[in-house]
Image: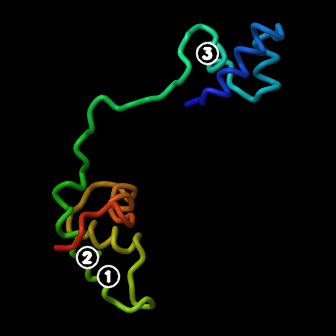
Amino acid sequence: MKRVDAIARVRRAFHVQGWSMKRIVRELHVSRNTVRKLLRSDETDFSYERERQRLPRIGPWQEPLEKMLAVNETKPARERLTLIRVFEELRTLGHEGGYDAVRRFARPGQRPAAR
């Protein structure tokens, strides 16, 4: 969410400089809810971590998708399918998930090495 320097600026403006919440919002371009949260808590770093990872819908489709991407990489550059076309091909096979999951899976360095 907010880094330590931004948190320090908000707290300094309120406690040391005596600015109102409204002025902090205007001058530092931070939302009112964020300012309120920063002033009420003593934390120095705010981050969100997911408690548990949901199973993606792409799970059962990983193997066919890996094959499609591997075949696509062997083609010449002009004949390769765009990722949206790969997604549409996967949809014709029955995949009901979203494009973002396919895009994340196909990101270079994220996929397991070819077998």
- From mark 3 to mark 1, how far is it between C-alphas? 49 Å
27 sits left or right of 87 in the view = right
| 97 to 91, vertically: above or below | above
Viewer-closest of 11 and 81 = 11
Residue 57 tag number: none
The residue carrying pointer 3 sits among few (fewer than 14), some (14 to 19) or many (20 or more) residues within 10 Å by Cα, namely many
Tell me which amino acid carries mark 1: Asn
Q: Are marks 1 and 2 in contact (CB under 8 Å)?
A: yes
Residue 68 tag number: 2
Q: Dot 3 lies on which element?
A: helix
113 sits left or right of 19 in the view = left
Q: Which residue has dot 3 on it?
A: 38
Q: Which residue has dot 1 on it?
A: 72
Tell me which amino acid carries mark 2: Met
Viewer-closest of 62 and 41 = 41
- From mark 1 to mark 2, how far is it between C-alphas? 6 Å
Mark 3 against mark 2, which lies toward the viewer? 3
Q: Quadrant of residue 55?
A: top left
Tell me which amino acid carries mark 3: Leu
Mark 3 against mark 1, which lies toward the viewer? 3
Viewer-closest of 66 and 61 = 66
Q: Dot 1 lies on which element?
A: helix
**Residue located 27% across and 38% down the image:** 53
